[in-house]
Image: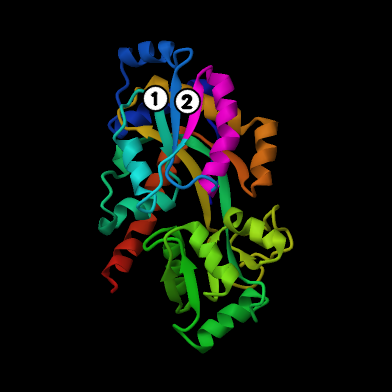
């Protein structure tokens, strides 16, 4: 993934205003006034997590929120709104008042499958949001049950090639990022998986632990606990360099497979039309929190890499990933 560089404070405000203007945001004199009053002392800002308490997004939100709360001087309350493969919570964010008092996880690329798949009936798309930035990244790994006969990614992929369409691969949703990434592996490496969809990341991991499926693909943080306990074996990290969280797990590249790295960004967004200056205030607070050593230590403890990405660069990343992934999702939706 292309390395993104944080902007200077001056350029930051300018880039946010430009990005919001392009996305339908409003940068005007009223924005300056809003920023001066935002947030009011004692006000409550809702951080909407579109998944269950205890899930990955929730854990990370509760690590970062206290630091933002201290910086902003307002109560930053983590609120779980699960359901519909995250669509319920994402709808809530998109339809909230654009006053900066509501933001939520719009992780890239997982959000793409939520609105590019018509069957999920999302009431939003990319233009419904204005990113405030991304605070961490999550490398993608391939995991199998502890008793799996496969002890390397080569052994697994050789078995797939020997019996195309037989080995089962779990995803957390149809047309989600797991599904897309599996299809990319199939296309690039000439493989054929029997893909099985579950309702959540927790269900997917449970299917691996129980041996219900042969393997699964997903963020290292979602497998980390079960990997440490010995319930799951990790066969590879789909990166060019080893993961600091699972340094003994070989990369796909080192195993001899030519595949672009896969990673997810934990991004946050407010509703579109939120004043640019308010977005800039939230962005600066998120940046400060993401660069706090205590916060970084806790994020690393949850097997995620602290990496701040600015609002404008998050917008660009979202647009680029949508352009790359939309044709894959369109193809998936044509399958029965």
Predominant SS of the magenta segment: helix
Colouring of the image? rainbow
Please identify the quarter of the rendering in which residue 332 is found: bottom left
Residue 157 locus on image (x, y percent): 56, 79
Between disc 1 and disc 2, whose residue precedes? Answer: 1
Residue 296 within the segment the image draws in magenta: no
- How many dots with numbers? 2
Which residue is denoted by mark 1 in the rendering? 100
* Mark 2 secondary-structure assignment: helix
The answer to whether 217 appears left or right of 273 in the picture is right
Residue 57 locus on image (x, y percent): 51, 45
Q: Nearer the viewer, residue 269 or 51?
A: 51
Residue at left 45%, top 58%? Answer: 200
- Direction right: furthest residue: 248
Marks 1 and 2 close (CB-CB < 8 Å): yes
Residue 244 locus on image (x, y percent): 70, 52
Residue 199 locus on image (x, y percent): 42, 60
Residue at left 34%, top 26%? Answer: 274
The answer to whether 10 appears left or right of 82 in the picture is right
Q: Nearer the viewer, residue 219 or 65?
A: 65
**Residue 317 in view in this figure:** yes
Dot 2 alpha-carbon crowd within 10 angstroms: few under 14, some 14 to 19, many 20 or more: many
**Does 264 sit above or below residue 32?**
below
**Does 128 sit above or below residue 215?**
above
Q: Nearer the viewer, residue 332 or 52?
A: 52
- Residue 111, which numbered label? none
Which residue is denoted by mark 2 in the rendering? 282
Marks 1 and 2, how far apart in space? Answer: 8 Å
The span picked out in magenta is: 55-78
């Amino acid at each position: 993934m292309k390395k993104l560089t944080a902007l200077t404070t001056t350029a930051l405000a300018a880039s946010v205003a430009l990005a919001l203007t392009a996305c339908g945001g409003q940068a005007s004199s009223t924005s300056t006034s809003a920023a001066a009053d935002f947030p009011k002392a004692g006000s409550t800002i809702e951080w909407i997590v579109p998944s269950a308490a205890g899930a990955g997004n929730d854990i990370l939100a509760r690590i970062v929120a206290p630091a933002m709360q201290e910086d902003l001087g307002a109560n930053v309350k983590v609120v779980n709104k699960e359901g519909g493969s995250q669509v319920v919570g994402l709808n809530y964010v998109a339809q909230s008042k654009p006053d900066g008092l509501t933001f939520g996880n719009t992780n890239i690329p997982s959000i793409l499958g939520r609105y590019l798949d018509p069957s999920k009936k999302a009431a939003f798309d990319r233009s419904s949001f204005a990113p405030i930035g991304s605070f961490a990244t999550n490398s993608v790994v391939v995991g199998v049950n502890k008793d799996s006969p496969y002890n390397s990614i080569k052994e697994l992929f050789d078995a797939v090639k020997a019996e195309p369409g037989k080995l089962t691969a779990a995803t957390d949703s149809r047309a989600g990022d797991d599904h897309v990434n599996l299809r990319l592996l199939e296309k690039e490496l000439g493989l054929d998986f029997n893909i099985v969809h579950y309702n959540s990341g927790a269900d997917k991991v449970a299917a691996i632990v129980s041996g219900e499926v042969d393997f699964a693909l997903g963020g290292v943080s979602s497998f980390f606990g079960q990997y440490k306990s010995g319930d799951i074996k990790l066969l590879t990290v789909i990166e060019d360099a080893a993961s600091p969280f699972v340094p003994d797990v070989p990369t796909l590249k080192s195993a001899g497979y030519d595949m672009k790295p896969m990673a997810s960004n934990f991004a946050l967004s407010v509703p579109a039309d939120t004043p640019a200056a308010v977005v800039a205030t939230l962005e600066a607070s998120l940046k400060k929190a993401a660069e706090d050593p205590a916060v970084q230590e806790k994020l690393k403890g949850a097997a995620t890499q602290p990496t701040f990405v600015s609002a404008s660069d998050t917008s660009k990343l979202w647009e680029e990933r949508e352009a790359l992934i939309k044709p894959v999702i369109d193809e998936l939706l044509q399958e029965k």
